[in-house]
Amino acid sequence: MELDRRGAELLFQVLTEREEKNSVAIASNESFSGWTKTFTDPRLCAAIVDRLTFNGAIIQTGTESYRLAHTKAQALQASAG
């Protein structure tokens, strides 16, 4: 989903105001290099990634999406049954 410049600026402002006050958790199936599809301004995208990763913990599960795996399993059951 693409986020317009104003939306990205507002998100950056929220992240800036929460910095060192509260935690923020973000989940994404996209690597940081792919975030430019959502945040179309490369400088703003880099600033958001920088803000999120500074003093943060990045957890990569390296697993396939649960929803995708579940959908595939249901499709297999439907075709077999």
Image (spheres, rainbow, N blue to C red):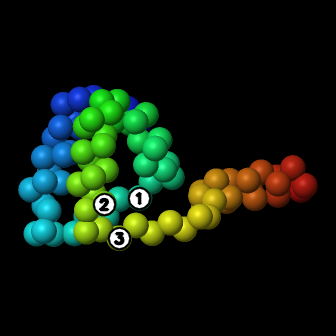
Disc marking residue 60: none
Q: Quarter of the image containing the C terminus?
A: bottom right
Is residue 3 visible in this depiction of the protein?
no
x and y percentages locating residue 26 in the rendered image = 35, 59
Residue on which the image places disc 2: 53
x and y percentages locating residue 27 in the rendered image = 41, 58
**Residue at mark 1 to residue at mark 2: CA–CA distance:** 13 Å
Tell whether 46 sits left or right of 78: left
Q: Quarter of the image containing the N terminus?
A: top left
**Residue at mark 2 to residue at mark 3: CA–CA distance:** 7 Å
Q: Nearer the viewer, residue 18 or 50?
A: 50
The amino acid sitting under disc 1 is Ala
**Residue at mark 3 to residue at mark 1: CA–CA distance:** 12 Å
Circle 1 sits in a helix, a strand or a loop, which is it? loop
Residue on which the image places disc 1: 27
Circle 3 sits in a helix, a strand or a loop, which is it? loop
Neighbours of disc 3 within 10 Å: few (<14), some (14-19), many (20+)? few
Is residue 70 visible in this depiction of the protein?
yes
Q: Nearer the viewer, residue 65 or 72?
A: 65
Residue on which the image places disc 3: 57
- Residue at image coords 63%, 59%: 64
Mark 1 or mark 2, which has the lower sequence index? 1
The amino acid sitting under disc 3 is Ala
Circle 2 sits in a helix, a strand or a loop, which is it? helix
Tell whether 72 sits left or right of 42: right
- Residue at image coords 68%, 58%: 69
Neighbours of disc 1 within 10 Å: few (<14), some (14-19), many (20+)? few
- Residue at image coords 30%, 43%: 46
Disc number lying in front (3 or 1): 3
x and y percentages locating residue 54 in the rendered image = 25, 62
